[in-house]
Amino acid sequence: MSHDLLSVGDLGADGIDEVLQLTDSFVEVSERAIPKVPALRGKTVAWLFYEDSTRTRLSFETAARRLSADVMNFSVASSSVKKGESLRDTVQTIEAMGVDAIVVRHRSAGAPWQVAKWADASVVNAGDGWHEHPTQALLDCYTIRQHLGSCEGRHVAIVGDVKHSRVARSDVLAFTAMGAEVTIVGPPTLLPPSLEGWPVAVSHDLDSVLPKVDIVYLLRMQRERMASGLIPSLREYTARYGLTRRRVDRLGEDALVMHPGPMNRGVEIAADVADLPRSVIVDQVRNGVAVRMAVLYLLLGAGSDKVLTGVEGAS
Ligand code: ASP
């Protein structure tokens, strides 16, 4: 990790591993009666969310508070953005008040890189359009490690609307960096038009893939980013690609079911499948707080100098 966390690809295997190891300590902190440490006392973290979020925003906020940072809440819906203020002016305004980190979510791919050019504060990408969601990938790697020991040699099927999914892009980068094999599964219309450079196998047949995988990672149908007509109907999608009880029976005994949330129960995942013991979706959310504590600590905390010098791919 350098000064910012924009793409999970910048971390490399060593950088990801360093975050995961530090996350162990923050999981321990989160389990204490008073889950709070003074690590970032005196630092201020601001949110700049131009897109809706439940988990990511609450998770970053909880992470910052558990590290004793001050938080600056900025709601685009009730701010001067509504009066036409540009992203650049908004960033400069926030910076002028004195912040150490800005956590950005934006509908346009690349927006966090732009913010990083304008800001002196560390910038964390909390999701940019269809492009990347690096902390989701980190918490997914952590959850796999927690349940299966490591990502190395594991086979992950990422199923569904890969085309519009920033989670899929970051997960492919992180899982393969950590030595996992990835197969993306979905109808051709929901896969990216070109998979050149993607280190993945592709399948359109979920039933044949399920017996071979250690993790089935389901994606939401991202209708807010979709032109109409990409699938004949949701019912047809569910029939071919939904994870039903019958399909779960094709999985190996220890195989995990994951989902980044928000879930559409009954579409990509059957309601009862989401609650099976092998579904680790709640663990993903829980681990998200500790992973984000690790990220904020590495960017802003006392340990950042050590980390900044030791990580491949830092720029
Ligand atoms: N919460 C994830 C994201 O922000 C996944 C989703 O919205 O489907 O990309």
Image (cartoon, rainbow, N blue to C red):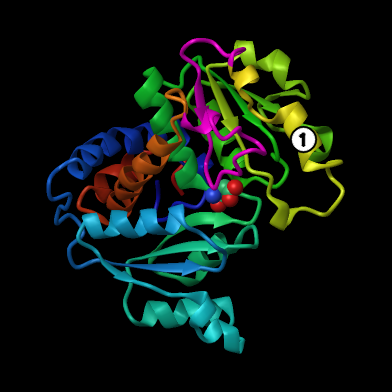
**253 inside magenta stretch:** yes
Q: Is residue 260 above or below residue 212?
A: below
Q: Is residue 148 above or below residue 227?
A: above
Left or right of 148? Residue 163 is: right
Q: Is residue 100 visible?
A: yes
Residue type at numbered disc 1: Tyr
Camera-nearest residue between 83 and 85: 83
Taken as a whole, is the magenta stretch helix, strand or loop? Answer: loop
> Mark 1: few, some, or many residues within 10 Å (few <14, many ≥20)?
some
Q: Is residue 312 visible?
A: no
Q: Report the residue at 65% width, 62% height from top.
A: 108
Left or right of 244? Residue 125 is: left
Q: How many marks?
A: 1
Q: Position of residue 165 (x, y in %)?
A: 65, 45
Camera-nearest residue between 299 and 285: 285
Q: Which residues are magenta?
A: 249-275
Q: Is residue 41 above or below residue 89?
A: above
**278 inside magenta stretch:** no
Q: Secondary structure at mark 1?
A: helix
Q: Which residue is mark 1?
A: 237
Q: Position of residue 288 (x, y in %)?
A: 38, 44
Q: Report the residue at 51% width, 59% height from top.
A: 53
Q: Report the residue at 47% width, 57% height from top.
A: 54
Q: Is residue 236 above or below residue 289?
A: above
Q: Position of residue 87 (x, y in %)?
A: 56, 76
Camera-nearest residue between 210 and 153: 210
Q: Report the residue at 33% width, 72% height from top.
A: 99
Query: In which quadrant of the rendered view does residue 278 lie?
Result: top left
Q: Position of residue 305 (x, y in %)?
A: 26, 49
Camera-nearest residue between 207 and 115: 207
